[in-house]
Amino acid sequence: MQRFRKSSLSLVLTAVLLAAVWVTWPRQRGLAQTSMPGATSAPATTAAPAAAASGPVAALPEAQNVIAYLNQSIDWHRGLSAEEQAANDPSDVLFVNQDQQSANQVLRLAFDFARADAQLLAQDESASKQKTAPPPTGYQQLYTAAQAADEEVRQTQAELQADKNKLATGRAADRPKLQATIDELQSELELAQTRSKTLHDVLQFVSGASGTGGNLAAQIDELQRSVPELEAEAAKSRSSPASSSGTPIAAEPGNAQTPAANSTASATVNAASARRSQPSGLLDLAEDMFSLSHKIHTLEQRQQATDALAQSAQKLRAPLVGNLTAVAARGEEAAKQADTSDPAQLAQLKHELDSLTASFKQASSVVLPLSKQAVIFDLYKNNLARWRSAVQSQYSADMRRLLLRGLLFGFVLALVIVLAQVWRRAVFRYVHDARRRYQFLLLRRIILWCCIGITVAFALATEIGSIATFAGLITAGIAVALQNVILAIAGYFFLIGKYGVRVGDRVQISDVTGDVIDIGLIRLHLIEVGGTETDRQPTGRVVVFSNAIVFQPSASFYKQIPGTSFVWHEVSLMLAPESDYAQAEKRMVGAVEKVYGDYRERIAEQHREMERTLSIAVALPKPHSRLRLTQTGLEVVIRYPVELASAAEIDDRITRELLHALEQSPKLKLVGSGVPNIQPVTEEKAA
């Protein structure tokens, strides 16, 4: 019964310790991780070989360094997407495929290194737990309670076995008591075993969670699941036999790529096939140079990232290589000592060499993936260098083509401008007519801008077919949207033609009469004139018409004959029947001839210009008279040309001269008002 009370007290103590562990676990975890490796060692007789074997393990990278290196390797591997996006040429796909294979091998070797390191850390930690004393403060009571529970189980088992022996050899009278004692000890043993198992489970959980190897392996597996390429290879390797070296077959160089890599490569090829084979236009060359510059920058960034990852691998590998060198040196030294040693020393040296061999194998399993990575890093950087050299060559070639086309474009543009200036000077030198000069200068301006536009189009366009397509589309759009403007522009060329109008001409459009002051590409501007038929004066208004007026059948458009600015006026007098018509006609024609003589030369010059323009013979405009017999008397009609600019003044002078001629002796007698009637000659009157 005393033993049972002692067991109950131990059970209570176990519960208290479990509660303490769960409360203090988050706070004591870091302390346990740093303090457990420094525990008390086992006796020196058994620790000597283990110390030799664990020499390289002491130089293993720590868990946080391994995880940091794996994260850096994964980030570097994910940087391949930048290369895939930059591969816009079929030749780039070859470099991308090689980089993908190298990057997959580098990442695979990084995980191989991490797993080997985690395995050795776990073995070293397990061995240290077997050789070391119980954990320090925070887990000391738990460890002591587990030892006490184990001791109690052993004592109970020993006592139970002794009672069973007594039961087999004892007297019959003592057997009921012994049987009751055995039953009580059996129950006590079950309780002690349950308590011991519980304490050891908690202690195992604390040790496993505090340990580096197990936690590191779980993190490595979690990181591998974040890489689809390696996860696919891992699934394939689980379903296929491994190679003789323990590495999955898919991880060996030269094997087929993963489906994800193949799909990525095919997508890259499809994207690159759509690229133009050779840029030709200035814009296309500039765009291609910008793309090549971005590609060069991407490759330089990948070069820097590869150098950084290689340096990190070198930092992890350097202490391991140094440890291997030390182990190799120690092995050579032991081999030299074997030549001069006795059998006891040889046995000790053999044991030491075996320990060194085991240590070398363990360390080399960690160093070998990093050494392979160093070789692949060199291959990867060489591939990047060749890719960058190829891209740089393309960039230089595009630069030369761009400069050549730019110079050619500038030369053609300068030639067009020089020819336009020569044309302009020739027009000012050889064309003296203002109207013709204006037409030639306008034609020069149109041709100049057309040539500049065509030159720019050929310089910027990639293919001639694209120019034709673009011109067709834009012409159709312009024809629909600007049909009125196009019609006005076409009318402009009719207005400035050989029989068109020029500035200063008097025209009549519908009911508006005016003098032309400007002929634009779209519109025609007139200064409106109004008043009587024989005395028109500016009204102070400017009338604007679209040039398309020449194509409207309902619009009336009248203008002077090219090169002339005169119109016909007529004056009529009604003579009495008894008047001498011959003398009256002579006086009246003489009065008109007297005024006409002042501007006869200007009319004659206009007549010559009219004949030259029309290329036909026309009678010289001069005053002439007609007699017409009416019911009231004899009507004398005299027609004469007048200049538009001074028509009113000429009519006034002719009226005065006619009145003066009528008053001469013998005085002519008129019928009606007796005042001459002057009016312009219309088509009806001329008929």
Image (cartoon, helix red, strand yellow):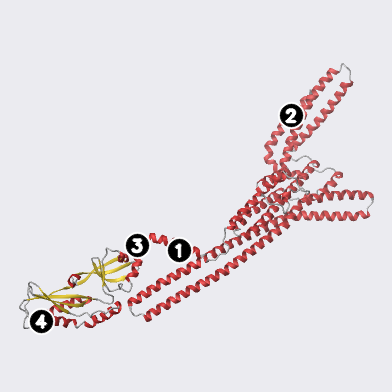
Image quarter in which the C terminus is found: bottom left
**Residue 447 drawn at (x, y percent):** 42, 72
| Pointer 3 with pointer 4, Cβ within 8 A | no
Tell me the residue that label 2 is attached to.
Answer: 11
Residue occupied by mark 4 = 582
Q: Residues within 10 Å of mark 3 (few under 14, many from 20)?
A: some
Number of other residues with Cα within 10 Å of mark 4, as a class: few under 14, some 14 to 19, many 20 or more: few
Q: Is residue 484 left or right of residue 509?
A: right
Frontmost residue, 663 versus 297: 663
Instruction: Give the camera-side residue of 227 and 51.
Output: 227
- Which residue type does callout 2 highlight? Leu
Q: Residues within 10 Å of mark 1 (few under 14, many from 20)?
A: few
Circles 1, 4 touching at the beta carbon (< 8 Å): no
Query: In whole angstroms, how far apart are the C-alphas of marks 3 and 2?
Result: 107 Å
- Measured along the vertical axis of the image, is residue 76 above or below residue 531? above
Closer to viewer: mark 1 or mark 2: 1
Number of the label disc, if any, that sits on residue 484: 3
Name the residue type under label 3. Answer: Asn
- Amino acid bearing label 4: Ala
- Mark 1 or mark 4: which comes first in sequence? 1
Mark 3 and 2 residues: CB-CB less than 8 Å, in contact?
Answer: no
Q: Which quadrant of the figure has residue 297?
A: bottom right
Amino acid type, residue under disc 1 in the picture: Ala
x then y, percent, for residue 277? 58, 62
Q: Are marks 4 and 2 in contact (CB under 8 Å)?
A: no
Tell me if 538 is positioned left or right of 274 in this view: left
